[in-house]
């Protein structure tokens, strides 16, 4: 696999941070491993982990060859919204995990994609996440795009980085938002104590921007549309909680008591738009709100 060339645009940024920022599928720890293994070079010389970039530096990152896929194909029904030889967009149901992990060895979206696509999935993300360009939470429903080859994967990853891959969500948050629209611009990082959670971290967090717009107001709740400018873990959930309006049903960042009829947070990835890797044309897909979401809105409307 040809190395990925990354041109530095900041002065004094640690190499591992720089790589993780420009290659969304690599975590910072994964970038550190590549540096330690000598897989990152500058002008043909290995880059040290503590190297700080200068504007104009071009780092060559040699990603590991795809490992044999350990996840097994499973005949799990998929709601395919768009598909061609390079990409596939599916409408993920609430409750489905995206890729195998501890506690979820199978029954995931990856298992379903392997059955549906056969060997036609990119290998950049390794054995357990073939084709996966971005993720949505287990209890978030909606659109997710996967790459069928490394060419498409790299192009989509670049679009995530430069924000040309557009993602729009709908959600119900707790409380009444007074303004009709707004933006939360707050960096997100690991929670300092509860490591499974994320939090606004203005010192060490990664840049995160969420634009929101009110669609409807109900007594004690607001139906909103959110557009992601970045794609941090739990971004909408963390950002809305940070301004005092956690998502309905989110027992991690909001009230601990589950909401009857909800498996988790009321959050649906409704619209996705991307530049096709091969044709260069913009493709936009949408999916309707699922039953659990429309039932929530109906209950709130009856209370109004």
Image (cartoon, rainbow, N blue to C red):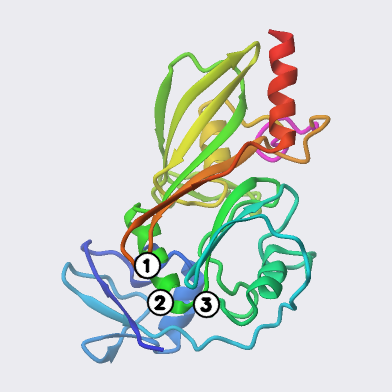
51 over 66 or under it: above or below:
above
Q: Decide: marks 2, 1 in contact (CB < 8 A)?
A: yes
Q: Check residue 252 for magenta coloring.
A: yes
Magenta segment's dominant SS is: loop
Badge number at residue 277: 1
Badge number at residue 52: none
**Within 10 Å of the Cα at label 2, are there few (<14), some (14-19), or many (20+) other Cα atoms?**
some
Badge number at residue 122: 3
Question: Which quarter shows the N terminus?
Answer: bottom left
173 over 159 or under it: above or below:
above
- Regarding mark 3 in the picture, which secondary structure is present there? loop
Q: Decide: marks 3, 1 in contact (CB < 8 A)?
A: no
Which residues fall within the magenta stretch? Answer: 250-258
Image quadrant assignment for residue 150? bottom left
**Residue that appears at 74% across and 27% down:** 295
Image quadrant assignment for residue 18? bottom left
The x, y position of residue 199, in whole percent, is 54, 44
61 over 280 or under it: above or below:
below
């Amino acid at each position: 696999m040809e190395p990925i060339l990354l041109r530095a645009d900041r002065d004094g940024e640690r190499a591992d941070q720089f790589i993780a920022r420009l290659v969304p599928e690599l975590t910072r720890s994964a970038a550190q491993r590549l540096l330690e293994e000598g897989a990152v070079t500058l002008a043909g010389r290995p880059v040290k982990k503590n190297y700080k970039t200068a504007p104009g530096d071009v780092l060559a990152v040699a990603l590991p060859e795809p490992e044999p896929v350990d996840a097994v194909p499973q005949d799990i029904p998929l709601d395919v919204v768009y598909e061609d030889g390079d990409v596939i967009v599916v409408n993920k149901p609430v409750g489905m995990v995206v890729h195998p992990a501890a506690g979820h060895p199978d029954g995931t979206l990856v298992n379903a994609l392997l059955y549906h696509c056969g060997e036609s999935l990119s290998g950049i993300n390794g054995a357990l996440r073939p084709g996966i360009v971005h993720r949505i939470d287990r209890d978030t429903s909606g659109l997710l795009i996967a790459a069928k080859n490394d060419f498409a994967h790299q192009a989509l990853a670049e679009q995530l980085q430069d924000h040309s891959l557009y993602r729009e969500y709908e959600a119900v948050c707790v409380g009444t938002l007074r303004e009709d629209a707004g933006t939360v611009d707050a960096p997100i990082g690991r929670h300092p104590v509860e490591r499974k959670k994320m939090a606004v971290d203005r010192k060490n967090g990664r840049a995160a921007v969420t634009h929101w717009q009110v669609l409807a107001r109900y007594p004690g709740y607001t139906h909103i549309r959110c557009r992601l400018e970045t794609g941090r873990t739990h971004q909408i959930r963390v950002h809305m909680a940070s301004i005092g309006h956690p998502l309905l049903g989110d027992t991690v960042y909001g009230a601990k008591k589950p909401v009857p009829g909800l498996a988790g947070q009321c959050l649906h990835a409704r619209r996705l738009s991307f530049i096709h890797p091969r044709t260069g044309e913009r493709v936009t897909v949408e999916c309707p709100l699922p039953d659990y979401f429309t039932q929530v809105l109906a209950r709130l409307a009856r209370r109004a």
